[in-house]
Image: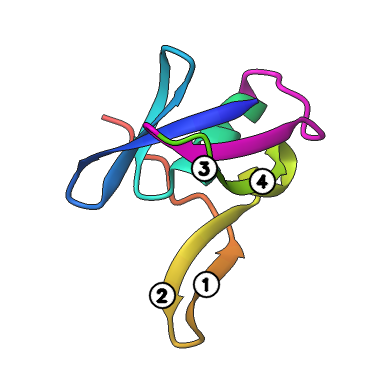
Amino acid sequence: MNLTISPSGRGKHHARLGDRLITTSYTPLFSAARILLQEGVSGEETLTMTHEGSEAICMRTTVGTAARLTVQDDARGFGFRRYRPGPSITA
């Protein structure tokens, strides 16, 4: 399964599977993987990512691995970190 990403402005990217917009995020691969996992896609499913207009795969992982990660710039430096969901906001 391949995600195609395209810029949406201010550092965010749209992530699409075919014509379906999955998410718009600063971390489109990881955010899309969490959505796909919630929708019932197997964590073992291979997930690739390409940029719109290119066939070159820029990232390859599994849905389950990507769903567990995010990108952070903190005291340890810039890199992949374990995803920890923030508090839910209800109105």
Label whose residue precedes the other's in the sequence (2 or 4): 4
Residue 73's disc is 2
| Residue type (three-letter) at the residue carrying disc 2 | Asp
- Determine the residue located farthest toward the right in the rendered image: 44
Residue 68's disc is none
Label whose residue precedes the other's in the sequence (4 or 1): 4
Tell me the CA gap for discs 2 and 4.
Answer: 22 Å
* Mark in front: 3 vs 2: 3
Residue at x 65% of width, y 25% of height: 1
Residue at x 66% of width, y 35% of height: 47
* Mark in front: 2 vs 4: 4
Tell me the CA gap for discs 1 and 2.
Answer: 7 Å
Q: How many residues crowd around disc 3 within 10 Å: few (fewer than 14), some, or many (20 or more)?
A: many
Q: Position of residue 38 (x, y in %)?
A: 62, 25
Q: Which residue is mark 1?
A: 79
Does the stretch in magenta take in 45? yes
Q: Secondary structure at mark 2?
A: strand
37 lies left or right of 22: right
Q: How many residues crowd around disc 1 within 10 Å: few (fewer than 14), some, or many (20 or more)?
A: few
Tell me the CA gap for discs 4 and 1.
Answer: 16 Å
Q: Position of residue 37 (x, y in %)?
A: 66, 29
Q: In the rendered structure, which segment of residues is drawn in magenta?
A: 38-53
Labelled pair 1, 3 in contact (Cβ < 8 Å): no
Tell me the CA gap for discs 4 and 3.
Answer: 10 Å
Residue 60's disc is 4
Residue at x 43% of width, y 49% of height: 27
Q: Secondary structure at mark 4?
A: strand
Q: Which residue is mark 3?
A: 29
